[in-house]
Image: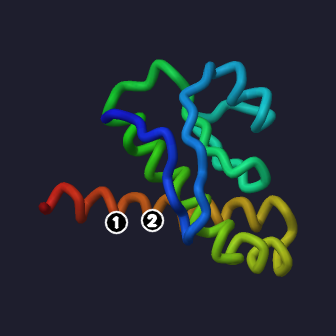
Amino acid sequence: MRTPRTVRIYGVTYKVKVVSTEEIETTTGGEALGFADRDKKEILLAEGQEPHVLEDTFVHECWHARLAESGVEDLIASHFDEDTAYRVIEAIVRNLTTAELREKKRK
């Protein structure tokens, strides 16, 4: 997969950057393959991933950005404690990412 420089999510342009795993860990406070930064309008992807994993990570982070831009993440966060909200959001993103990748493979 050739990583795009930008992606538009609900009319908002996010820069897409492939960065070191150390930068991802510094940004997220832990291990991760990617991060969608709503404030900076950036999607960070950890370098060194296999192409198919990088593509999955990109799709996954786009879903995080979609949920953030739509206000769904804020809605979930306002109704649950931080830990529960994170688990709910991750479950939604995991299911949406998996469904999108399955649909892509059918084409």
Identify which residue, 6 or 28, lies in the foreground.
Answer: 6
Q: Secondary structure at mark 1?
A: helix
Image quadrant where residue 32 sits = top right
Report how far apart the C-alphas of labels 2 and 1 lie in the structure. Answer: 6 Å
Rendered-image quadrant of the N terminus: top left
Amino acid at pointer 1:
Ala
Q: Position of residue 29 (x, y in %)?
A: 80, 34
Residue count near mark 2 (Cα–Cα under 10 Å), binned few <14, some 14–19, many ≥20: few
- Left or right, 6 with respect to 25, comes to left
Q: Which residue is mark 1?
A: 99
Q: Compared with residue 98, is residue 70 higher up or lower down, i.e. above or below? A: below
Amino acid at pointer 2:
Asn
Q: Which residue is mark 2?
A: 95
Q: Are marks 2 and 1 in contact (CB under 8 Å)?
A: yes
Identify which residue, 21 or 8, lies in the foreground.
Answer: 8
| Residue at 45% in and 65% down | 95
| Residue at 56% in and 69% down | 11
